Amino acid sequence: MTHHLLLGQKTFAEWRAVAQTTHRARFARLIEQADSYSSYLPPLEHPRETITYIGMAVANLAFAFRLTDDARYLDRAREWIKIVSSYPHWGILRHPDTDLNAAWLLFGWGLAYDWFGDTLPRDERDALRAKLHLQGTRLYNFAVANEGKWWSSAYWQNHNWICYTGLATVAFALENEFPETRAWAQRLVWLKDETRTHDLGFIFWLANVLGARLTGDAALLPDALAAAQTLTRRYNARGEYLQAWGLIDGTREERGRTNIDLMMNLALLFWASEQTGDWRYARVAARHARTSRLVLVRPDDSTVHVADFDPETGAFLRHATHQGLSADSCWSRGHAWALYGFADTYRRTGDEVFRAVAQRLAEYARVHAPKDLVPFWDYNAPDIPNTYRDSSAAAVMASGLLELAEIESDATRAVRWRAFAEKITLSLWQNYSSRGTNIPAILLHGTRSVPHGLADHALIYGDYYFVETLTKLLRPDIAARVFH
């Protein structure tokens, strides 16, 4: 039996069956989306605007065809493929073959090729395969030539993840016909030994640990353990903190800097101790959390983004920021990272001090929330309300509040935190979702970093935590198995 990408162990016949029973609502949504493509075609020439939507449009049409055998969907997909295959490049601006547009097309079309390539006329199948191979090769060669720079660097955010996802998807789709594409799918693995990033927890907790729990594929776990070991190399025992950005043998400033984001990387370390029985990982995580509580949480229950230490003595030096307004302000996504991270650290340690600080941070967020509950990019921005929101901060906050509700000792407070999370999630869907647009994201109006000119756009981690929150609210059975 042939297994297809992203479809698990089910055949198309089995997927048709669940589409008419347990997945009826999702099937209806798929058909609604596929039918919408009948009213328009992509432009004949690559526009200056984004074409990311074309990737999933073709994938949706392919899946709709497989579930219905309705040739209209197949014919429409063929029309879209013919037009867009003629574009000499899939990206725009400075990175014509290596940007978010190219990555989304590789992802969606790689799925489509795997799902319905065998039904295409021979010449069309050959042309689609050749285009995927060409674009995948361009993206892969760029990654090799620019190792340590741009999206192949240690900075693993936003479209960087999609670039790798697109490359890996088309690699799996083509591996039987182009054996060299197997190397494309291995572009992720090197990060387990990467010492230039503090985000190994984000990467390997989400992709490998949660991936293994969802799929049952234990082969994902050794790389996660290796990544946990690598992450501990960023630990400064004198200051009892994990180093944020920079080389582990870099400048004094690099070696002495930590941030609030790191609270979300600790789950990988706690998990590594549970897996191996080696409690050094958990000790590093707990000590870093204790230091973060002391230096990154203010007496008024707001949070600091960055703290600088003397890396030689471990002495605290000063507060700073990288993405917030100032060293004295409260960057909203950082505050959400902290709330979630401290709640999760309590769950894993049972240390009451961590639950207490999570409660304080949640109350600060509640008191300072705007009317629609989606925070501005910094709680202290001087031009509120005429400034940017951050929908990703709200999504992280909602999921963190649900964590806090589960560990609460007081039933009244637990109800309060859950209700707050539900209201945030509803506001995100009603006021910040991409409904009615062609933007390939769930949430709009995220803000990556105002100081760097990156604001009012979709953010992939905003989408992730929104879906995580929905999973906790609607499928607690899955949430209990996967997230804890």
Image: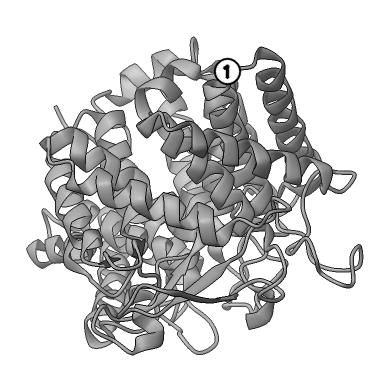
At x 74%, y 24%, the residue is: 416
One can see residue 72 in this view:
yes
Taking the image as shown, residue 2 lies to the left or right of residue 122, namely left
Q: Quadrant of residue 191?
A: bottom left
Taking the image as shown, residue 278 lies to the left or right of residue 191, namely left
Q: Quadrant of residue 180?
A: bottom left
Quarter that holds the N terminus = top left
Total marks placed: 1
Relative to 438, residue 249 above or below: below
Per the image, label 1 sits on a secondary structure element best described as: loop
Location of mark 1 (residue): 409
Relative to 484, residue 60 above or below: below
At x 43%, y 42%, the residue is: 62
**Position in image of residue 451 (x %, y %):** 67, 80
Taking the image as shown, residue 330 lies to the left or right of residue 96, namely right
Q: Residue 426 versus residue 55: which sits nearer the camera?
A: 426
Taking the image as shown, residue 106 lies to the left or right of residue 378, namely left
**Position in image of residue 66 (x %, y %):** 39, 32
Q: Quadrant of residue 473?
A: top right
